Image: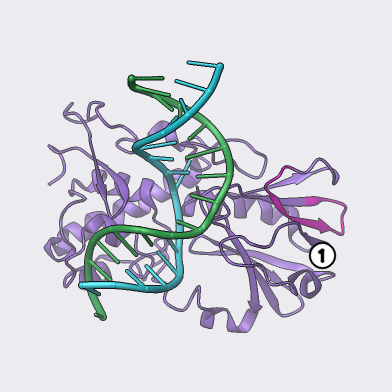
Chain colours: A purple, B green, C cyan
Amino acid sequence: MPELPEVETIRRALQSQVQGIAFSKITLRRKDLRFVIPSKLPRVFSGAKIQNLDRRSKYLLFHCDNGFTMILHLGMSGRLFFTEAQGHFHKHDHVIFDLKDGKHLRFRDPRRFGFLDYTQTDKLNEHAFFKHLGPEPLQKHFNAQYLYERLKKSNAPIKSLLMNAQVVVGVGNIYANEALFDSQISPLRKGKEIQLQECERLVSDVRAVLKRSIESGGTSFRDYVNIDQEPGLHQLSLRVYGKENQNCVVCHTKIKREVQTGRSSFYCPTCQN
DNA sequence: CGGTGGACCTGCTGGC
DNA sequence: TGCCAGCAGGTCCACC
């Protein structure tokens, strides 16, 4: 489900509701998500106050005053939302976070590709999830020179490289397709064929599409919803993703769909070279 | 090592 | 209406 803009949208809304609030109780209704949730997690975080809600890549990070950070990934179908009280559990409501201010936060994830873990906050960067991650796309380390160096020896298609979290984090299938369209670069080209000048455009277009999407509250192509269970609006601005056989907004050529490394790529065969 | 393809899950849609 | 194939905003791991 979520790429960087969707996770960031959730983070911003959730932050204002949980910062400074302590967990009173955490209930694991089902532990076998993508990875098994550590049984100790509820004990470690009961009573801990959330100092800050952060994001790295597509991971939500609850930094707490006990020196630990809870790590939550929404996978493909995960959602977080508040409920007034307990009871009436949906069959995919896997984790319930009771907060000291009386709110109940729920994690629901039908496909169970999401997961929940924790680590000592000062050892976060050593955690297996974070050790090999590339730069955040909205930060300075992600620039044309860096991208060019990272691509120039690779035979993999540029589309797969943009989605590779070791190259840059947060860019999933929707935004990889959209940024490549904006940059007029074919998703089929090899990394090593991409010139420095094209990297300039790509870096700029990746940033721009992510920022626009955050401003629109994310993309709800299928079932993404924010913390208030409302859809985002950025799907209205998509130009190629999901547009197979529709006319290119620039040149009216029919948009093509092609499967690359198991994921659908959408592109304009005329505009993108 | 770099790159690809399968695996992990459930649910929804569209075609017959 | 019912069934089945194909599809889905992610990521890890085994294999060549």
- For this rendering, which residue is in front, B3 or A199? B3
Helix, strand or loop at label 1? It is: loop
Residue at image point 73% right, 50% down = A106
| C10 with respect to A60 (left or right) | left
Q: Amino acid at mark 1?
A: Ala
The answer to whether residue A51 of the structure is visible from this angle is yes
| A21 with respect to A192 (left or right) | right
Image location (x, y in percent) of residue A256: 21, 36
Residue at image point 13% right, 62% down = A195
Q: Is residue A69 magenta?
A: no
- For this rendering, which residue is in front, A64 or A261? A261
Residues rendered magenta in the picture: A90-104
Number of on-image labels: 1
Which residue is under mark 1? A22
Image location (x, y in percent) of residue A225: 58, 40
The quadrant holding residue A161 is bottom left
Mark 1 packing: few (<14 Cα in 10 Å), some, or many (20+)? many
The quadrant holding residue A45 is bottom right
Which chain does the residue under circle 1 lie in? A
Image location (x, y in percent) of residue A42: 78, 69
Q: Is residue A87 above or below residue A165?
A: above
Residue at image point 39% right, 53% down = A172
Residue at image point 23% right, 26% down = A247
The answer to whether residue A71 of the structure is visible from this angle is no
Q: Is residue A209 above or below residue B8?
A: above
Q: Is residue A96 magenta?
A: yes
- For this rendering, which residue is in front, A78 or C7? C7
